[in-house]
Amino acid sequence: MSAHEGQPAGLELNWGRTWSIARTELRQLVEAKDFWVPMMILGSIFFIFIPLVLLFAITRISNVDAVQQISETIKILPQAAQNSVKGTSDQARAAYAIAVYLLAPVAVVVPLTISTAVGASTIVGERERGTGEFLAHSPASVHEIYLGKLIASVVPGYFTTIVGFGAYSLIVNLIVGPGSGGWFFPTNQWWILMLWVVPPFVALTLSLVLRLSARVKSTAAAQQASGLVTLPLIMIAYGVSTGSIYGSLWPGIIVGALAWVLAFLTLWRGMRAIRRGRLIGVADGL
Amino acid sequence: MTTSDNRPPIDDQAPAVELRGVERSFGANPALVDLDLSVPAGSITVLLGPNGAGKTTATRVITGAIEAQSGEVRVFGLDPRTDGESVRRRCGVVSAKPALYDRLSGRANLGYAAELYGLGRSSQVDDRIHAAAHRFGIEGALDDQVGSYSTGMKTRLALARSVLHEPDLLLFDEPTSGLDPESSHAVLEMIHDMTHGGVTVIMCTHLLLEAEGLAEQVVVLESGHALAAGPPAELIDAFWPDAVVRLDAENPERLAEVSGFAGVSKVEVVGAGMDELAGFDGGGEGDQVARLPRTGVDVSLTDPAMLADLVAALVADGVRLTRVEPRIPSLEDLYFAIRRRHVGDQHRSEDGGRRLQPRGTTVGTRVPPPPPPPVTVGQPLVEPRKAVQP
């Protein structure tokens, strides 16, 4: 078999077809209540329910010892981060630290979880439903199919994150803001995280997940295998958000830049690795 | 044949599809073995063969959905490996599974195909969608979710999708799979109607009745190899150059004697080929018992005028004939004859040439018929078969 079966020689993309593939995938997700209802619940838990309960409890807590203990935990943050914590009382400072620093990984976990759930089944799902045969015989190139699937996998997770983040910002400002000098959220670090760090992490993860989805024999296997990919990335993201983003903007910008480079590399390799035959499950190795 | 959009020009002189020495295997399993195939433009070609014969793989290689590992593939003179998009834009495919998106409506499925095939989204495309849906009788269900469609409706929708972009080549892989007889008949009529505009059709099936009357060319595949190819009438002439008469008798065992009559070139036991194809191996003396007629025989006559003498002689010999019927071999007869010959060739090959005759079906061949010559699509093979008057 040739090295690049089913692929055009260059990387000529028909964006109309790419968007069409992405849009069709998304329309199917919208029609699938069994997918988006759990997605909404997951987003609500992480962005609304947990912050609401946690921040409300801290700002209204009357137990001085408990507040003292939370205040002590702020001391484990980098000095620059400690200096930026605002608040007129220990309660307000504790709530500020939790809202700004400790819940940050949520913004990475939610889109990764949702996007990998979509991405894991996107190619193997076509094969299982038999629709991969239609795509394989269509004029769409494997690059367009790959990118279309990637876009369709990114959008639900990132959309949930943006909407959830808006709700989270509102909660933080309404509950923590009065004790911290007014509405302050999102901070600069959070803007960097949401717009610069999270997207490449999602793209990086999905580029690997899509390759897995093309290789495995069933959706269940794809879900299992994608777990192997996402767990380390979630851990890395956790470390990034709790360490390097504190205090200064630069660590976040640098980490984001590295993630973008890595994401583009893996996307490029992913596009080159997909074979048309995998849509119908006949590529060698299956 | 038409060209539109930005399609490269079609080579009108070239066959619609041409495969030369195509090989493709999956791991250690060969799917196509040195496959040659030539499909004239505007014809209906039926790929016949059992499961695993390579029919589906052949269609996939034609569109470039998978690549041949060696050999040459040309579709309207284009190579699917290098001009894949152009080739696929000219093809409409209906696979064995309808390959539809169940969660979307019929309209959305057709709209998606329109976008992928470069028709875009416009009111003209909407009109095309309506026209295609109307043509296949699913216009009323266009806004329903495909998951709620019956199997027949799904097939109709898949057919509508396959013609939406007005392809030059239609590939149908067992399009009546899972359909009831009425729906199958309707679908086959639709396929037949589709070819009126000069479209080339390649249809895969293992249902011989489907191909009967529809096929202008047949290609019999076995283990990825083409055993025979050509117009059915020419292949039948090649396999049965003489006039054929079916004889049944109350005492069918006596029909074995027919081989001794003058003018009889060949006698075939009705239904015996099924044993052979099913792996029957009656080696030794017992083999003769299995070869005896159970119901009747097909007798080939070098001269149709000898039929009356033959019947009279058989009756005089005490054969109680219950049927004397001029026989026009069907596609099914042809298919099994081709496969019998293949099985016989295999046996000869396995026996190292020690056995002179293939086991099985012929009880009294006085003059062993020569194997049919290599078949080239579009060329007459032998003189037309002689007609027998009852």
Image (spheres, rainbow, N blue to C red):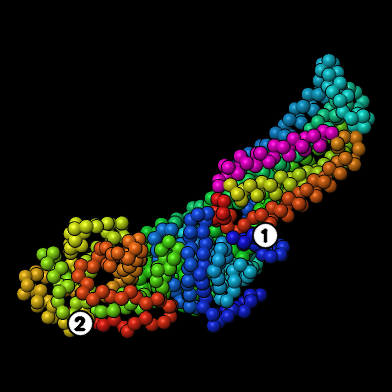
* Residue A241: x %, y % from top left: 81, 36
User: Can you tell which quarter of the image residue A12 is in?
Assistant: bottom right
Position of the C terminus of chain B, as image quadrant, is bottom left
Magenta stretch, main secondary structure, is helix
Tell me the number on the disc at residue A251. Answer: none
User: Can you tell which quarter of the image residue B213 is in?
Assistant: bottom left
Using residue A183 as the reference point, say whether residue B84 is left or right of it: left
Circle 2 residue? B304
Going by the numbered disc 2, the residue's amino acid type is Pro
Going by the numbered disc 1, the residue's amino acid type is Glu
Q: Is residue A276 magenta?
A: no
Using residue B124 as the reference point, say whether residue A86 is left or right of it: right
Circle 2 chain: B
Residue drawn at point x = 77 percent, y = 27 percent: A54
Circle 1 residue? A144
Q: What stretch is highlighted in magenta?
A: A217-243
Label 1 element class: helix
Nearest the viewer among B165 and A140 is A140
Q: How crowded is mark 2: few (under 14 residues within 10 Å), some or many (20 or more)?
A: many
Using residue A149 as the reference point, say whether residue B178 is left or right of it: left
* Residue A67: x %, y % from top left: 84, 19
Decide: is A108 above or below A279.
Answer: above
Can residue A254 be seen by looking at this rendering? yes
Label 2 element class: helix
Residue drawn at point x = 21 percent, y = 74 percent: B366
Nearest the viewer among B255 and B211 is B255
Circle 1 chain: A
Q: Residues within 10 Å of mark 1 (few under 14, many from 20)?
A: many
Position of the N terminus of chain B, as image quadrant, is bottom right
Q: Does the magenta stretch include residue A237?
A: yes
Decide: is B247 above or below A135.
Answer: below
